[in-house]
Image (spheres, helix red, strand yellow):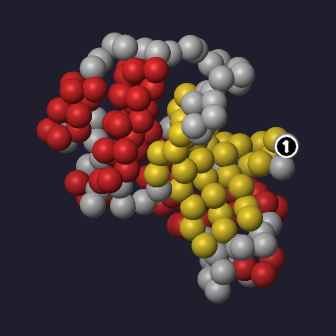
Amino acid sequence: MGYDPAALTLATIAALFDRQGWRYQIIENHLVTVFDGVPIVVDVDDERAIVLLQTPIAPGRGMPGYLPTSAEAERDAAIYLLSVNYRLALGAYTRDHKDGEIRYEISFPAAGTSVSEEQILQAVSVIVATMLSHAPVVNALLTGRISLRQALDQLERGQGGLPPAMAV
């Protein structure tokens, strides 16, 4: 069961959440929810008919919760994220070069189709799986608890990475 893409708005996504009984809040024109302990922000680009889901990993400078880190740790985290992104079939880790904020983002077009509960749930499942696998490693790199070599070795061995069915 889906929605008319011509009417794609945040309200249509909220109605989909309501029908499924999924909890959420609308905060500053974003739908904010939590699945399996992973916070997710849902946005709609109604002009281009795109649904965007993102989850924060590390806040940037000037954001609440920001912890200063060394340039080397930021570099190591960025290299790790590039290595992970190379393997991902869906979504990507992103880093704002201005303030260092790191997020995982996944989006899908809704033009010419309808948005279904299954599409949202699939995107949420991918977010939760990748966050549980990689966010702890990114945070360990940023705080210097592991080296880049250790993180990349874990990734190569399949530890701390996505299950093969979810990776390219």
Whether residue 116 is situated above or below residue 19 in the rendered picture: below
Which residue is outermost to the left? Answer: 157
Tell me the element at label 1.
loop
Q: Which residue is drawn at 64% across and 75% down?
A: 110
Q: Horizontal placement of 148 versus 37: left or right? A: left
Q: Which residue is drawn at 72% across and 79% down?
A: 5
The front one of 11 and 142 is: 142
The front one of 100 and 114 is: 100
**Residue 91 seen in this snapshot:** yes
Q: Which residue is drawn at 17% across and 41% down?
A: 156
Q: In which quarter of the image is residue 157?
A: top left
**Residue 136 seen in this snapshot:** no
Q: Residue at x 23, y 54 (%)?
A: 164
Tell me where residue 153 appears, x and y as whole percent: 17, 32
Whether residue 138 is situated above or below residue 110 in the rendered picture: above
Q: Residue tagged by mark 1?
A: 28
Amino acid type at image mark 1: Glu
Whether residue 73 is situated above or below residue 115 in the rendered picture: above
Tell me where residue 9 appears, x and y as whole percent: 80, 66
Which residue is outermost to the right? Answer: 28
For the N terminus, the image quarter is bottom right
Q: Horizontal placement of 167 versus 121: left or right? A: left
Tell me where residue 31 appears, x and y as whole percent: 74, 49
Whether residue 71 is situated above or below residue 26 in the rendered picture: above
Q: Horizontal placement of 95 versus 153: left or right? A: right
